[in-house]
Amino acid sequence: MTLYKHELKMNRMSFFIWLVGVLSMAAGCIFLFPLIDESMSDMSDAFASMGGFSAAFGMDKLPITTLEGFFGTEIGTTFALGSGMYSALLGISALSHEESGHTAEFLHTLTLGRVGIVTGKLLSVITFIAFFDIIAFGVFAGSAAIIGESLDMKCLIGYVIAQFAAQIETASICFALSACSRRSGTGVGLGIALILYVLDIVARITDKADFLKYITPFSYSNATDVFVNKGSIETVPLCIGVCVTMISISAAYIIYNRRDIAA
Amino acid sequence: MNSAISIRNLTKNYGANRGVEDISFDVAKGEIFGFLGPNGAGKSTTIRCLLGLIKPSGGSAEILGSDMVKNHLEIMKRVGYMPSETQFYPSMKVSEIIKFAADVRGIDCGKEAEKLCDRLKVDTRKRIEDLSLGNRKKVSIVCAMQHKPELFIFDEPTSGLDPLIQAEFFELVREYNEQGATCFLSSHILSEVRKYCGRAAIIREGRLIACDTIENLAHTNVKFVRISGINELSADGISNVKQTADGMEFVYGGDINELLRALSNVNVKDLSIEEPSLEDVFMRYYN
């Protein structure tokens, strides 16, 4: 519990920076919606019929002239990418930064044990992601209310839950890598988030790469899909994602428990 | 022997690189034990194996009667460790680091920490990033001592500390030792080992080459010989020959009668035959 509190304290500043950065963009887009609503009405059909481009951003499924369509195609993408990158950074630095910052010797010679260290850090990662999504939910609903619109609550809750699962999956993959590494791995973390995002785009553009939707968490957490499906999340990719999360977390425990800790 | 530390055939390989090989020794409860060796000899590797930071390739280690691997957490509650290169979280204040170390152990160390900070002149309001190496080491001493452990493990504790704080540090070690604590002191500074330790082990290139009382380590059949009037002498057992302004000096490890016979055949102006200092012994092991 002491390490958990310590981790929350140590990482709170980066949490607030990412939270403000990502959510101000999302809220800004919602506030812009009334201004671009009318100008986009004529272009709605054009946006929906741009082939692969429309499919990549879900504009073939939801009209961009409604707030839900605009949210699914524009805001959902911005939020998914931003929160995905933040989750990856949280995971990749959780364990390895002790060795890269040369604080591992201090931490490991207290009475925490390796299992205790992994658990404390994992719980703090999950907590930050949970708070990120809860606050995001409030900002989405609040911003929509401010401009006199409303988002379907069932869809929004489904989307935030899907995002939470996807962020935890991304963070856990990076967390497992963090357990193997002695370097901070910031570039690797951001790279993983971007690769997973690109895999989702590719899976949406071409049917031949449809299998990729079972690999990347961005597929089952896609805002357009969740809003089209009235808040329900595609089961198979989600279950695969949960399995990947469990395997990654288990791997982190096993690897970190066995390997030598650098000074 | 009632051991605080018992190491048996400890080996650690880093792939093709040498770590430590087949190290065995015991540290008795209540003693101050020196662990001598130059930089890179394997002192820190041995300590890091002891503390479970790295996994040994072979052998075993017991601390305070328990297997270090199986009972790691229980053992660490009774151990205070100070690493050679101390680093903490840069953005935290000294007081926060000291409290964090105590909170993790689940005990209130407030009074002891306050006493230690006062004696070592630690400014608890400063941030870690604003501290010099010496001041970070002082914080590390507080973190290692505040919970009054049964066993201290210090890895080159005095490097970076000014002489006054070094003296205060050893005074604290002496006080805790009088209360029953054991101290394992890794160092390459011979004078502090000679002054404060009862026994010592010497490690060279990953292998233990001597382990005995300081008295026995210094009192060997080796003699330190200084001669004026001659520049060379032939006898079995002469080593480490150095030329001086008016003669020569060397370490003699052979039969003393053989040396006297050799000296009787040359014209000696002056002669001294002394017990070697611990420094001489140390150098002999390393040459």
Image: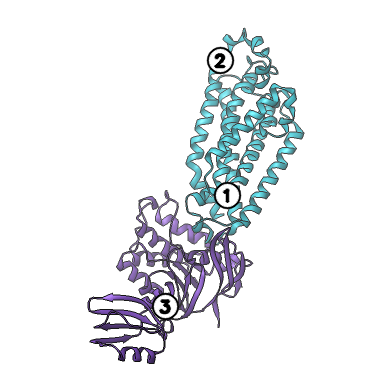
Chain colours: A cyan, B purple
Label 2 crowd (10 A; few <14 / some 14-19 / many >=20): some
Q: Position of residue B188 (x, y in %)?
A: 40, 69
Disc 1 residue type (three-letter): Lys
Nearer-the-camera pick, B29 or A187? A187
Name the side, left or right, on which A48 lies relative to B136: right
The residue tagged 2 is A34
Q: Which residue is mark 1?
A: A121
- Mark 1 vs mark 2, CA separation in Å: 42 Å
Give above or below for B77 relative to A150.
below
- Which sits in the foreground, B214 or A245? B214
Q: Secondary structure at mark 1?
A: helix
Q: Amino acid at mark 3?
A: Cys
Image spot of residue A15 (x, y percent)? 51, 39
Does the rendering let one see residue B174?
no
Q: Is residue B178 left or right of residue A257?
A: left
Say what amino acid the circle numbered 2 marks: Pro
Nearest to N terminus: mark 1 or mark 2: 2
Identify which residue is drawn at 57% across, 64% down.
B12
- Mark 2 belongs to chain: A
Q: Do we see residue B265 in this rendering? A: yes
Subunit of mark 3? B
Q: Are marks 3 and 2 on the same chain?
A: no
